[in-house]
Image (spheres, grey):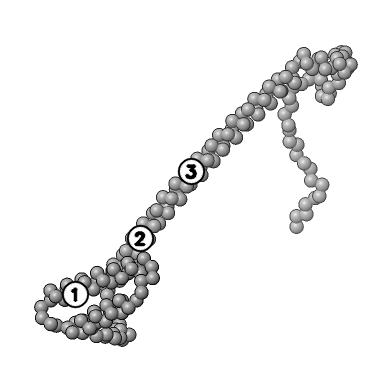
Amino acid sequence: MATMAIGHEVGRLEGERPAAAAGKSRNMSIAQRNRELFEAQRARRRGPTPEMFFTKHIDNTRIVKADDPQRKRDMRIFTAVMTIFFMLTMVYVWQHFYSIQKGYQVEDTKLQVEQLREDNRQLRLMDAQLSEPGRIDHIAKQLGLDEPLPGQVVRQDASGSMVPALAQAQPVQSVVPLNVN
């Protein structure tokens, strides 16, 4: 009986609302369909049992969650496994990036070696060009220089020989006498 009264009350209230737009008429058709489905369900039920709903206020403030040692153990194991997995992943990522960085360094070093080889080749070529005897004679003649006459060359070595001499160590005499008492 209570559901009949509620159903008729809802129908009466919805029927009183004016449909201002197409959205409103759609809502009306949905409400009409819901009302028809509700009536069909009520007709299939056995007996004239009214449906009544009561609100029940539940207070869970006094409930305390009990500790579960098995769950704590499982969570610790899970945390340890995930930490190890994370560490292994980070080591792998670090190793990967480190190898990429070293690859770039190797390529840079190869470019430097090639540049230095090219510079060395250019310097050897320039040295060969500048130390060519014909070129030196030509520049000397342009500057008015001639070949030296005999006796014009003075050597630093008094003996006149170019033989290397060995260094010799001579004992040093002490100037200050030692007093032994």
- Judge from the rendering whether residue 28 lies leftward or rightward of residue 160; answer left or right: left
Q: Which mark is residue 39?
A: 1
Q: Residue at x 43, y 50 (%)?
A: 93
Residue position marked by numbered label 3 in the rendering: 100
* Quadrant of the image containing the C terminus: bottom right
Which one is closest to the eye, mark 1 or mark 3? 1
Q: How dense is the environment of label 1, judged by Cα within 10 Å: few (below 14), some, or many (20 and up)?
A: some
Q: Position of residue 160 (x, y in %)?
A: 81, 20
Q: Residue at x 74, y 26 (%)?
A: 165
Q: Residue at x 74, y 17 (%)?
A: 132
Q: Nearer the viewer, residue 159 or 57?
A: 57
CA separation in Å, label 3 and label 2? 27 Å
Residue position marked by numbered label 2 in the rendering: 82
Q: Position of residue 32 (x, y in %)?
A: 26, 71
Q: Position of residue 89 (x, y in %)?
A: 39, 53
Which one is closest to the eye, mark 1 or mark 2? 1
- Nearer the N terminus, badge 3 or badge 2? 2
- Judge from the rendering whether residue 88 lies leftward or rightward of residue 158; answer left or right: left
- Nearer the N terminus, badge 1 or badge 3? 1
- Judge from the rendering whether residue 47 lies leftward or rightward of residue 120; answer left or right: left
Q: Amino acid at mark 3?
A: Ile
* Quadrant of the image containing the N terminus: bottom left
- Judge from the rendering whether residue 39 lies leftward or rightward of residue 141; answer left or right: left
Local SS, label 2: helix
Q: Which mark is residue 86?
A: none
Q: How dense is the environment of label 2, judged by Cα within 10 Å: few (below 14), some, or many (20 and up)?
A: few
CA separation in Å, label 1 and label 3? 73 Å
Q: Disc 1, disc 3: CB below 8 Å?
A: no
- Nearer the N terminus, badge 1 or badge 2? 1
